Image: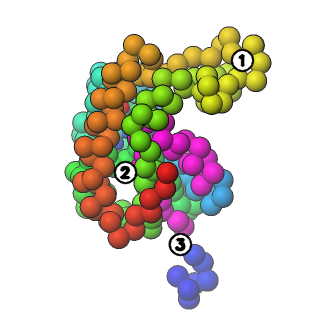
Amino acid sequence: VAASGKAEPLKVIISGAPASGKGTQCELITQKYGLVHIAAGDLLRAEVAAASENGKLAKEYMENGELVPNEIVVMMVKERLLQPDSQQRGWLLDGYPRSSSQAAALEDYGIRPDVFILLDVSEDILVERVVGRRLDPLTGKIYHLKYSPPEDDEIASRLTQRFDDTEEKACLVKLRLRTHHQNVDAVLSVYKDITVKAC
Ligand code: ADP
């Protein structure tokens, strides 16, 4: 690398529970380092929206707050990581891996990040954040009814909740958190030497 005078593009994995602030951090990091942001959840939602075979299969799991099977997720993420833009600019991978087998799959393909960022936020704070979180479908901006309210009534009137974030599904939020915590330790053991914790 030194001889060619060209730095290798940066490869980062970020992990955090739903509403841990991952979205904001991803924006800051990708802006600062010019990385391609690859979010497993976004890739899956695109499949659901396109009503592809994978999307139809994934939807059920996503609605139940469960991990989508590896057969769907691993290839989808790997292919995105190997696209020319990711290879040239470097990448920030978000929402993957969520299990030791997903981490192992990346290792098997020789894909290893330079740093693993873990956002560590308590469960009480996370539930409050998720339940109050709203999306402006027009701009894609995320609001929180209490902590980051919309600027005016017009925006307020069009805010929506993500289908897997609604109040009736508060128990599902907890299920998603439990799933997350169950898997995070296994993932951590793979990236122990390159982990940075933040809250
Ligand atoms: P959140 O961080 O709120 O879980 P995401 O957009 O990251 O939101 O993910 C939404 C859903 O997509 C998850 O609840 C899960 O069903 C599915 N999903 C996302 N990433 C993965 C993954 N790496 N493996 C399996 N399922 C995933």
Residue 25, numbered label: none
Q: How many angstroms separate mark 1 from mark 2 (CA)? A: 37 Å
Kind of residue at badge 1: Ile
Image x and y of residue 169, in percent: 38, 18
Can I make out residue 127 in this image? Answer: yes
Q: Which residues are magenta?
A: 8-30
User: Type of residue at label 3?
Assistant: Glu
Q: For the point 45% across and 35% down, which residue is it?
A: 126
Which residue sits at x=39%, y=68%? 194
**Is residue 14 on the magenta stretch?**
yes
Residue 52 in sight here: no
The earlier-in-sequence mark between 1 and 3 is: 3
Hey, which quadrant is residue 156 in on the image?
Answer: top right
Determine the residue positioned at 27% across, 61% down.
189
Q: Which label is found at residue 8?
A: 3
Spatial CA distance of label 3 from label 2 is 19 Å
Mark 2 sits on what residue? 78
Residue 25: percent from left, percent from top: 57, 49
* SS at mark 1 in the image: helix
Ligand 1 lies under 8 Å from the Cβ of mark 3:
no
Q: Which residue is mark 1?
A: 155
Answer yes or no: disc 1 within 8 Å of ligand 1: no
Query: Which of the two marks, 1 or 2, is nearer to us in this view?
Result: 1
Distance between mark 1 and mark 3 Cα atoms: 42 Å
Image side of residue 102 versus residue 2, left or right: left
